[in-house]
Each structure stands twice: as C-alpha cells, then as structure tokens.
Amino acid sequence: MSKTCIGLDVLGGDHAPQTILEGALLTVDPSTESPLPPERIVLFGDEAAIESSLNNLGGNPGFIISHAPEAIGMEEKPAQALRAKRKSSISLGTKAVRVGETGAFVSMGNTGAVVGASTLMLGTLPGVRRPGIAVTQHLVGRPVTVLDMGANTAPKPEDLLAYGVMGDILQRDCMGVDSPRVGLLNIGEEESKGTELLQLAYPLLKGSGLNFLGNVEGGDIFRDHVDVILTDGFTGNVVLKLMEGMASFMMKRLVDELKKQGVPIDPALLGGLARSIDSSEYGGALLLGVDGVVIIGHGSSDSRAVKNALQLAAKGLDTHVNQDIVSGLQTAGAITPE
C-alpha cells in the first residue's frame, strides 16, 4: 500500500457490503470513463466476507483487502462508537491515511463517525480550525460547490474564510474552473445584512484575494452566478436536504403530470435532467481541511455513487488538493485561532 491508494469502507452505508463492492468493481471496469487500477483501492471490512462476495461477483480484479471486523452503524453515536470499536472499518480506514498506507478514504457510513475519526486521527491542515464538508453539483451546466454542509454548525468568521479558500482550490484543482466566483450565503446582498458571523466574515473574504462577489441568496445556487457558496454547517445541511428532497419531488410531479396529460415519456428526454439532480452523480462530498483526502457519501449510495466518490478521491490525490489549500491559506492570510 502507498499514499496513492484509496481506502474504501465496505461496511458503511445502507446497502453495504454488496453495493459498495459493486461500486468498486465499476470503478476499475475498463469500460468506465477514467477507470482506476484495482491495486489503488484498499477494501476495509471483514476479509472472509469480502472475498466471498467478490467471488460471487466474478472475482477479485486486484483489490487490496485490509481486515476490519467491526462496523459502525448509521444510528450509533459517533464518539461512543469510535471509542468502543477501535477495529471498525472507519477507524482502521482513517488510521491507514494517518500512517501513510493510503492517501485517501471513502465511506458511505456514519457521517459523524467519519468526521470525528478524520479530525482526531488526521488533524487539520495549517490555517484550518475546523474541517468543512463540500458538496459539488452540476446544477447549472457547471459545478457549484456549497460548504459547509454539516461538519461545523457553529463556525467562526475565520472558518468561513478558510472554507472560501478551500472551495476555491477545490474548484480549480478538481473541477477545472479558473478564478472561481465565491459568495457568502445571506438573506440579502447588502454588506450589512445577516448575523454577526456573516458581517464579520464579509471583510475577511473581501480582503482575501479570492474572487469574492459578496453576499448571495439561496436562489443563486440555481443560477450561474457563483461557483462557491459559503455557509455554516447547520444551514448548509438544511439546504442540501431541501435541495435533494425538492429535486425528487419535482421530478415525480413532472412525470405524473406528463402521464396525466397523456404525453409520451421518453426516458432519454428526461435523462439529462434526472442526472443533474441525482446525488449519485456527485458521489460524495470532500471533507476539506483534514490532513488527508476524505470523501463522505450518502448512506443510500448506489454503485454509481461509490464509483464517482472513488474517482473524486483519486482526483483530489492526483491534483495535490491539500498542498494547494495550504498555499492558498498562506496567501489569503488565514491563521488558526488560538
């Protein structure tokens, strides 16, 4: 194993281990766009069960298997579970990043446990006080990143500055966007709007050297106005769940209404729309700010989501996103509060 390898939590998620392994196999399939070599993927879970499942799926194409006999359930309390289950797939997968056996870790399991293990075991990058979850979706024909999506519900102004820098680097390195436009989620565009947190963060972002456009409102997520939207973890998580719920609701209503009107439904016609709002298409969210590449996926992820999450992890490693984040934070003058 090496720092180019990507650990995969086989025991995390609602459909583990079957769907997780199917996603890993899809990632290395030669017919997949940008397939990964199987030797880059390290599977963390029960070794015997993994080998048996892979045999049923056609055999092991070359994955490395690292035995992790314990699983942390989706409903378990993260801190308690991490203390009690030192040999869980999340604990051992994160530890592998810390000791340099892998460079990245992907999990569709308990989000709180992944955030807790990553923060405690890996630590944060210089200039980062608390990590943030960054979700990137292609809603307007180009990638839009929103962070934080749930890791830090009570940030300080300095945290939002760090998120701005990290979101900027993510867009540049992993999404290929030059000079990403950064906005601060607020209830109005005026600089004086919003909570004390937002009012204090505004001048920090304005003087950071980022392409900061100022305050933006919720509707700007769906307009080609900004590439990075900054918010606290509580608001971001509400926004994410609302977006996903509304997308599913509107798609169902659209299909139902077309059927009611007797309009023939061509799956190819709606395919592009469905993919643009499908969480499987972005696969997972980068936990930005920890000293390693960590991807957190939906518990309900299907095999495509697992594949996309693994490819995102590879892109983060191969573009050296964390090294660029450290350089960006130095340029922006971000410092870790005492």
Image (cartoon, helix red, strand yellow):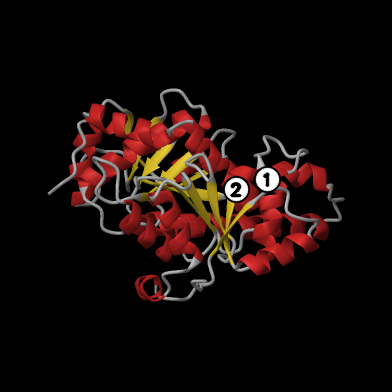
Residue 235, visible in the rendered structure = yes
Image location (x, y in percent) of residue 108: 55, 60
Q: Which is nearer the eye, 161 or 47?
A: 47
Q: Which is nearer the eye, 167 or 6?
A: 6
Residue 244 versus residue 52 in the image, above or below = above
Residue most extreme to the top: 178
Q: Amino acid at mark 2?
A: Ile
Mark 2 vs 1: CB contact within 8 A: yes
Q: Amino acid at mark 1?
A: Thr
Residue 302, visible in the rendered structure = no
Query: What residue is drawn where x is 81% and y is 60%?
Result: 260
Q: Which mark is residue 27?
A: 1
The residues bearing labels 2 and 1 have C-alpha atoms spaced at a distance of 9 Å
For label 2, the crowd category at 10 Å Cα-Cα, with few meaning under 14, some 14 to 19 and many 20 or more, is: many
Residue 171 versus residue 63 in the image, above or below = above
Q: Which mark is residue 41?
A: 2
Q: Secondary structure at mark 2?
A: strand
Image location (x, y in percent) of residue 47: 62, 65
Q: Which mark is residue 293?
A: none
Image location (x, y in percent) of residue 147: 39, 47
Query: What residue is drawn where x is 48% and y is 38%?
Result: 316
Image location (x, y in percent) of residue 271: 75, 45
In the rendered view, does 150 fall on the left or right side of 330? right
